[in-house]
Amino acid sequence: MFMKLALGLTTALALCLPASAETLRLSHNTGDTTTWQKGADKFGELLEQETGGDYDIRVFPNAQLSGGDQMKQAEMTGRGAIDLVLTSAINVTPLAPEMAAFSLPYLYPDYDAVDRTTQGAAGDKMEEIMAGHGIHVLAWGENGFREVTNSKHPITSPDDMKGLKMRVAGPMYIDVMNDLGANPQQMQWSETFPALQQGVVDGQENPIGAVIIPQRVYEVQKYITPWHYSYDPLFLGISKEKWDSLDDETKAKFQKAADEAMAYQIQISREATASGLEFLKEQGMEVHEPTADELAAFREATKPSFDKWSNQIGADIVKLFTDEANAQ
C-alpha cells in the first residue's frame, strides 16, 4: 500500500513540475562584449520567454565550438554538430561564395540600400542558398560597414595602403587589399588583437559599433578612416536538421525570438556606430573622414576585386543585389 501511495505521489509531482529545458548551443565569432554577444543573449532570453522555458540557449563566443575557426562554424552547423550560429556573410564564403555579394566593395551607399537587400529578394536568395548547405537562416543582423585602422599613418588615398600588413577576415578582402598594394594577412579574430599589439600586423578593417569599440581596437591602433568600403551582415542560422525536427508552433516561436533579437542587435550596432567616431577621438585615435573624390579613388582602385568576385558570385545574383541596393 505504502509503495503504491509513494509511486502515486511521485507521478503526481512529476506531472506538476516543468520538463527540463533542452539546451541548444549557439556559436559566434567575436568576444563577449560585442553586439554579436548581446544579440545572441537577447535571442536566448526571448526564446526562453516564448517557449515557457522549454529551450535554453548556451552562447559560445570566439568560435570556441570550432576551435577558434570562424569559417568552420557554418559548416559544422550545416551538418548538425552545432545547433545555431551567428556569423557574418563574409565568413561563410568558403562554403557559399554567393554570400560575398553582400560585401562587394562600394556596393552600398547607405543603410537604406543595405536593408533593401537583406529584407528583399536578394536576402531571400541567400537564405535559399544557405538552406542548400544545411542552414536555415532565421534572421539578418549587422556587423556593419567595415572601416580601416592602422598604427602607422593616416590613410587618405590608395597609396597610403601600400606595404601595410593588414589583417583580413576572408578571401575577398585579400583580393581587395592586394588591389590597394597592402600585404593582407588572413587570421582568426581571436588572434588579431595580440597580432596588432605585437606589430605582427599593422592594421585591420572592421565595423565601428560591432567590433572596433567593444573589442577595444583603439588601444592598439592610432588611425582610422571611415571609408565604408564594404558592408558585412550577420545572420542567425539554425541547423536545418534541428529546424525540421520542430513543429510549426515551435518554429513560429523561434522565428519571433530571432526577428526581435536581430532587430535589437542591428539597433544597438547602428547606435554605437553613430556615436563611435567621437568616442574614438576621445580615446586618442586620429580620424580622417574621406572626401567624395578620395572615396572615388578607393572605389576605382578596388574595381578589379569587384569584377573578379562578381564573376565568381554570378551575374544574376550581382544584378539582384545592385538593383535592390540602387532602387529609389
Image (tube, helix red, strand yellow):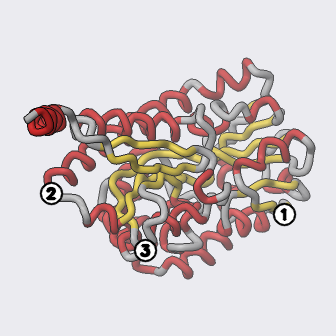
Left or right of 12 in this view: 311: right
- Residue marked by disc 3: 133
Q: Nearer the viewer, mark 2 or mark 3?
A: 2
Give neighbour class at mark 2: few <14, some 14-19, many 20+ (Cα, 10 Å).
few
Locate residue 85, reporting x and y percent: 47, 54
Left or right of 252 in this view: 322: right
- Residue marked by disc 2: 248
> What is the three-letter code of the residue carrying label 1?
Gly
Gap in angstroms between the C-alphas marked 3 and 1: 35 Å
Q: Nearer the viewer, residue 49 or 194?
A: 49
Q: Residue at x 57, y 24 (%)?
A: 275
Q: Which mark is residue 158?
A: none
Mark 3 and mark 1 lie on one chain; the one further toward the N terminus is 3
Q: Secondary structure at mark 3?
A: loop
User: For the image shown, how many numbered marks are present on the structure?
Assistant: 3
Give neighbour class at mark 3: few <14, some 14-19, many 20+ (Cα, 10 Å).
some
Give neighbour class at mark 1: few <14, some 14-19, many 20+ (Cα, 10 Å).
some
Left or right of 135 in this view: 89: right
